[in-house]
């Protein structure tokens, strides 16, 4: 199924597995690449040695192209007053669960792409590198392109897509508001600018010359066929893979995905400090979903972490980031390779009808 994207990435099927930090590692990426798509390794929660180990694991399992994804947010300036206010807002939950809040200032839990990461990327000669929240500094992007990597990044508006193309990306991921996990928005933080996939994709296709990958709410044949019919050169799928055996999705998260609760998702900042789509749970209902008290991304996560761990030990997802797109109907407990081939084969058949 040849498209501009398959030619660019040297893959067989026009499907990219969305990188999903915290719920997957090398096994899922390898399985999707072996099936003919582009598997992705999320690195926002990994140290440099972890990245080296996971890339080695992918290469031990597949000889096909794969994507390595990085966040490129600006690290925030700590705000002691805001941190104290956040701890105060969470204090009733700490008392209820009998756990202590983290003492003092804590380090950000999510890495941003920097010079040391660029050194490692060059050392590993990564075939495809993708970014979330825009792009890193121009000199770092230039380094990635100099060693031959194909560069992808997410756009949530037409303006972001044009900006990414002007700054050197080889393909744009058009992230509709339906998508699970963090919004890739980076030119502004106005949630009213966020469009649905079917509205966003054709506008970005018309606005840029590079291939466009449709993301958000695509979990079945009809969704994939619709995205391709609107001019996308490929699709990115995340939520549908969360129940695959290769995913590391927690038991609490898996149970939520199988429940009717998965039909109710919302954008929230209470888990990390930045808008991200999750299945609605207790913390979102009681403090958000969008809270003006939550510290800047990614600092909010540190205080929520102990609550999440304590509740999950009791089998509860009250304080867990249950990332999920608006369409969880495609979640299946089947091997990721089987799911990948089925999605694309079905989309091809639907496109012919």
Image (tube, rainbow, N blue to C red):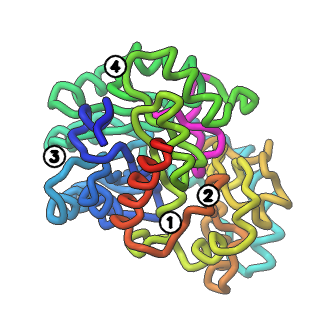
* Residue drawn at point x = 56 percent, y = 47 percent: 223
Tag 4 secondary structure: loop
Residue 249 placed where, x, y %? 50, 70
* Residue drawn at point x = 24 percent, y = 33 percent: 7
Query: What separation in Å lies between label 1 and label 2 (alpha carbons)?
Result: 9 Å
Q: Badges 1 and 2: C-beta atoms under 8 Å apart? A: yes
Look at the image and tell me in which quarter the N terminus lies: top left
Q: Badges 1 and 4: C-beta atoms under 8 Å apart? A: no
Label located before the other in sequence (1 or 3) = 3
Q: Which residue is mark 3?
A: 124
Label located before the other in sequence (3 or 2) = 3
Tag 3 secondary structure: helix
Q: Which residue is mark 2?
A: 324
Question: Which range of residues does the magenta coloring cover?
Answer: 172-187
* Residue drawn at point x = 62 percent, y = 61 percent: 328
Q: Which mark is residue 242?
A: 1
Query: What separation in Å lies between label 1 and label 4 (alpha carbons)?
Result: 31 Å
In the rendered view, tell whether residue 280 sits above or below residue 124.
below
Asked whether 225 or 219 is in front, the reply is 225
Viewer-nearest of labels 1 and 3?
1
Viewer-nearest of labels 4 and 3?
4
Residue 161 placed where, x, y %? 50, 22
Query: What separation in Å lies between label 1 and label 3 (alpha carbons)?
Result: 27 Å
In the rendered view, tell whether residue 251 sits above or below residue 303.
below
Query: What separation in Å lies between label 2 and label 4 (alpha carbons)?
Result: 30 Å
**Main SS of the magenta segment?**
loop
């Amino acid at each position: 199924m040849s498209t501009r994207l398959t030619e660019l990435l040297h893959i067989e099927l026009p499907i990219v597995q969305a990188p999903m930090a915290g719920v997957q590692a090398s096994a899922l990426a390898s399985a999707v690449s072996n099936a003919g798509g582009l598997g992705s390794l999320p690195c926002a929660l990994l140290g440099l040695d972890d990245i080296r180990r996971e890339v080695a694991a992918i290469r031990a399992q597949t000889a096909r192209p794969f994507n390595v994804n990085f966040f490129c947010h600006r690290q925030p300036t700590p705000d002691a007053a805001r941190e104290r206010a956040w701890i105060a807002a969470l204090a009733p939950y700490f008392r209820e669960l009998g756990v202590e809040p983290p003492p003092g200032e804590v380090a950000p839990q999510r890495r941003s792409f920097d010079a040391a990461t660029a050194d490692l990327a060059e050392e590993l000669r990564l075939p495809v590198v993708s970014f979330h929240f825009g792009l890193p500094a121009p000199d770092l992007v230039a380094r990635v392109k100099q060693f031959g990597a194909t560069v992808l990044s997410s756009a949530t508006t037409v303006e972001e897509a044009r900006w990414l193309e002007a700054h050197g990306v080889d393909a744009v991921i058009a992230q509709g508001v339906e998508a699970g996990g963090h919004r890739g928005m980076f030119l502004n933080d106005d949630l009213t600018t966020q469009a649905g996939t079917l509205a966003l994709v054709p506008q970005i296709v018309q606005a840029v010359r590079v291939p466009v990958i449709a993301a958000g709410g695509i979990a079945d044949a009809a969704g994939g066929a619709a995205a391709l019919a609107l001019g996308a050169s490929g699709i990115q799928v995340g939520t549908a893979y969360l129940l695959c055996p290769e995913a590391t999705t927690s038991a609490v998260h898996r149970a939520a995905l199988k429940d009717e609760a998965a039909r109710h998702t919302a954008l929230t900042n209470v888990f990390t400090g930045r808008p991200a789509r999750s299945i609605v749970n207790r913390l979102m209902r009681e403090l958000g979903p969008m809270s003006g008290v939550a510290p800047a991304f990614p600092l909010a996560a540190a205080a929520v972490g102990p609550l999440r761990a304590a509740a999950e030990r009791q089998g509860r997802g009250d304080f867990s980031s249950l990332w999920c797109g608006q369409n969880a109907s495609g979640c299946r407990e089947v091997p990721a390779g089987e799911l990948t081939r089925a999605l694309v084969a079905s989309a091809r058949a639907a496109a012919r009808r």
